[in-house]
């Protein structure tokens, strides 16, 4: 072969084949069926978007990861970096008249120009939902419950759900009167679960001991029981109370859904996209070092598209869930037996194959008039069984 | 709303929602199941390709329709304009060691910067197969039979298949000793079915009457019976005979598959991509003014990727098949009944909804504590039935 011949794909772009591709289809279809059964309707947005349109949903770092290019009339195009922003654009342009809430789901590929890392692709697949037009604790809970149902539907029973609220930590930090820089360091340390730094910052702050204890306590990843126990009887400023009540409401709904043992509270959860405004969550499997699924409330995004409207949702990483399924031995497998039929009479082969297919077999027809030896070799390599179809007796 | 707010998608890029999206999924899954049952394995290639890699499969016009852009290290990228070329690249780079024939299928989106026309998109969807590593009439026939099975699986019974052979017309034209320009005009006129021009070119050629009759006859779209009848007893040059024998072989196999009434011979069939080398075909429905499906043999494409290997295949236009299904009243419909459950006790709502979903209903839960009047309005608009779930009696 010509050594100069380039057959590679661009960095971070991969091909799927055979088991990987069919497993992906099975997983996506199971998710699509689940989401449909919860009243969510599918949406597929175009792969190419105007950059200035999609840019409305992104912060500077997210913008820096966009695949950008120019159209033939000089238009600034981009490949979608997530599905939530295109869906906001779509809903704001096409569905402003429909009764709310609106439930939408998707499965699709997104593009982010991230640093190449093990297991990280620049084109990758997500499945997810958006619940648009309702701002209640039940809505926050439905989204989290549906995320956990998604995992169970795929056979993953062992998972944890970290639940946070993006404004709550800010509200607590306001009490501390710490300088902005220190606040940011504290937030980052809580997100990083670097409790040594968290502790030393809080110790150095001019707070009474009880406040220090409270803040230290709230920085921890802990069960809902523990979290709300710490706050029992505390008198807290209005904004904190409102956010806490919502978190409590969501937690109670998750407990009602039987998820008490799966859920923990983690105020340090920060999500990739900057549009989150309320309850956020991430789902973890012990089989994987990063979240399989994440989402939360984003009440301001639709407004940026001229359709102010609360919303919440999540996205599940298809590559990640496939990794988890593989590691926990739950990859769906095709159970159709493979046959290779051969014989001299093509008409008989066609009808034999059709009959076998209708019984659930996957059937290949020998097209080359291969010898018995060649047929056996081919069938063995592909894990197929051989079946001769005799020609009509004369 | 801000009148300056741009919410549009780029020209030729569309969104799919609700029925359209779910129908597309159903159709693609039916096709995937069919292709699997014939022993084809799914492949999903990356959306972004190096332009010089994909360019190997394209002629100048095809290249002119590419979406092109530069990567951050100056790489020349493109969005795939078809699936056959990326699959050739994939097979040549990854699967050269597998036993042949190799059967692959795909469903996916492709990108072509065509002039915007009614019903034409610049991002559109295809499903198709590639049968790699075999160059027999049975292989040509399998591909055409599978295309017709694809239509039947989707509920389309009324269709015609035009079968041609891209070298055959050239071989005949060589006998005429016409100038190159006239040959090309004649080929174009045959492709356009402009028989007046065809006739006048042939009449003006220096051929004996019998040759003129033959050429005139072969230019027509006609049944296989008629076509081969015209040639019966004729003594023809070697290359023509070889191509004719293959066409005859394929035709006989199609007849054996019961497709005699669907098939006609049309030597004027020219396919979009220039890589075709042998038997080509197109599938038509009376419900649509352009082919739903097309394909054929392309024995030289893999060689351009360093892996010389015969192949054949087809691509089915998803947008087109959905149009046909709509027009012939065969769009698959979701048959799950929609319910909206409401009540004070969230736990009871969750469990009632779960029970109903397991019985096949699609169930939404009221998350807002809407009034009965609001619930009725919402349910009516969405075509749902309302169901109250009473709270536990105290």
Image: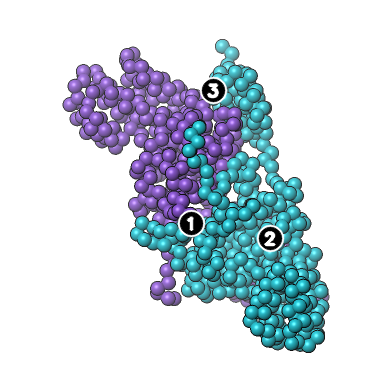
Chain colours: A purple, B cyan
Q: How many marks?
A: 3
Q: Which mark is residue A72?
A: 1
Answer left or right for A30 relative to A237.
right
Q: Which residue is under mark 3?
A: B368
Q: Is residue A12 visible?
A: yes
Please state the horizontal and vertical placement of residue B385, each as a whole percent of the image. 67, 27
Residue lying furthest left: A204
Q: Which residue is under mark 2?
A: B291
Please state the horizontal and vertical placement of residue A308, each as a whole percent of the image. 48, 30
> Is label 1 in a helix, a strand or a loop?
loop
- Residue A276 lies in quadrant: top left
Subunit that carries the residue with mark 1: A
Choose between A36 and B209: the one closer to the eye: B209
- The CA distance from mark 1 to mark 2 is 29 Å
Choose between B137 and B14: the one closer to the eye: B14
Subunit that carries the residue with mark 2: B
Badge nearest the viewer, 3 or 1: 1
Subunit that carries the residue with mark 3: B
> Is label 2 in a helix, a strand or a loop?
loop
Q: How many C-alpha atoms fall within 10 Å of the one at disc 3: few (<14), some, or many (≥20)?
A: some
- The CA distance from mark 2 to mark 3 is 49 Å
Q: Residue at x 46, y 57 (%)?
A: B48
- The CA distance from mark 3 to mark 1 is 47 Å
Answer left or right for B147 relative to A141.
right
Q: Residue at x 64, y 45 (%)?
A: B23
Q: Is residue B131 visible?
A: no
Q: How many C-alpha atoms fall within 10 Å of the one at disc 1: few (<14), some, or many (≥20)?
A: few
Q: How many C-alpha atoms fall within 10 Å of the one at disc 2: few (<14), some, or many (≥20)?
A: some
Q: Residue at x 53, y 36 (%)?
A: A92
Tell me which numbered mark, 2 or 3, is placed earlier along the sequence. 2
Answer left or right for B150 relative to B104.
right
Answer left or right for A28 relative to A158.
right
């Amino acid at each position: 072969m010509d050594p100069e011949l380039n057959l590679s794909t661009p960095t971070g772009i991969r091909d799927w084949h055979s088991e990987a591709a069919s497993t992906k289809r099975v997983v996506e279809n199971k998710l699509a069926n689940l989401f449909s059964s919860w009243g969510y309707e599918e949406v597929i947005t175009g792969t190419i978007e105007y950059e200035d349109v999609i840019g409305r949903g992104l912060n500077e770092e997210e913008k820096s990861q966009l695949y950008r290019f120019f159209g033939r009339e000089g238009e600034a195009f981009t490949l979608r970096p997530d599905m939530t922003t295109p869906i906001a654009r779509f809903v704001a342009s096409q569905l402003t008249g429909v009764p709310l809430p609106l439930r939408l789901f998707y499965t699709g590929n997104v593009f982010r120009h991230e640093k190449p890392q093990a297991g990280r692709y620049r084109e990758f697949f997500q499945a997810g939902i958006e619940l648009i037009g309702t701002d209640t604790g039940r809505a926050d809970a439905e989204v989290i419950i549906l995320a956990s149902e998604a995992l169970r539907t795929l056979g993953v029973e062992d998972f944890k759900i970290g639940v946070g609220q993006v404004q709550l930590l800010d509200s607590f930090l306001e009490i501390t009167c710490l300088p902005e820089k220190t606040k940011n360091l504290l937030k980052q340390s809580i997100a990083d679960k670097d409790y040594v730094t968290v502790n030393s910052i809080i110790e150095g702050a001019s707070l009474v001991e009880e406040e220090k204890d409270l803040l230290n306590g709230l920085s921890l990843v802990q069960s809902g029981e523990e979290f709300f126990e710490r706050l029992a009887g505390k008198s807290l400023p209005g904004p904190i109370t409102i956010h806490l009540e919502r978190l409590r409401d969501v937690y109670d709904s998750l407990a009602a859904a039987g998820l008490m043992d799966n859920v923990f509270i983690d105020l340090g959860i920060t999500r990739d996209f900057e549009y989150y405004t309320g309850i956020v969550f991430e789902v973890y499997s012990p089989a994987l070092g990063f979240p399989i699924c994440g989402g939360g409330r984003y009440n301001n995004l639709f407004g940026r598209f001229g359709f102010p409207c609360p919303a919440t949702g999540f996205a599940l990483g298809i590559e990640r869930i496939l990794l988890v399924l593989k590691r926990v031995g739950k990859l769906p497998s095709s159970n159709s037996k493979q046959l290779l039929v051969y014989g001299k009479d093509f008409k008989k082969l066609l009808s034999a194959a059709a009959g076998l297919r209708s019984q659930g077999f996957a059937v290949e027809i020998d097209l080359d008039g291969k010898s018995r030896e060649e047929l056996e070799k081919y069938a063995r390599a592909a894990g197929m069984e051989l079946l001769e179809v005799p020609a009509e007796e004369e």
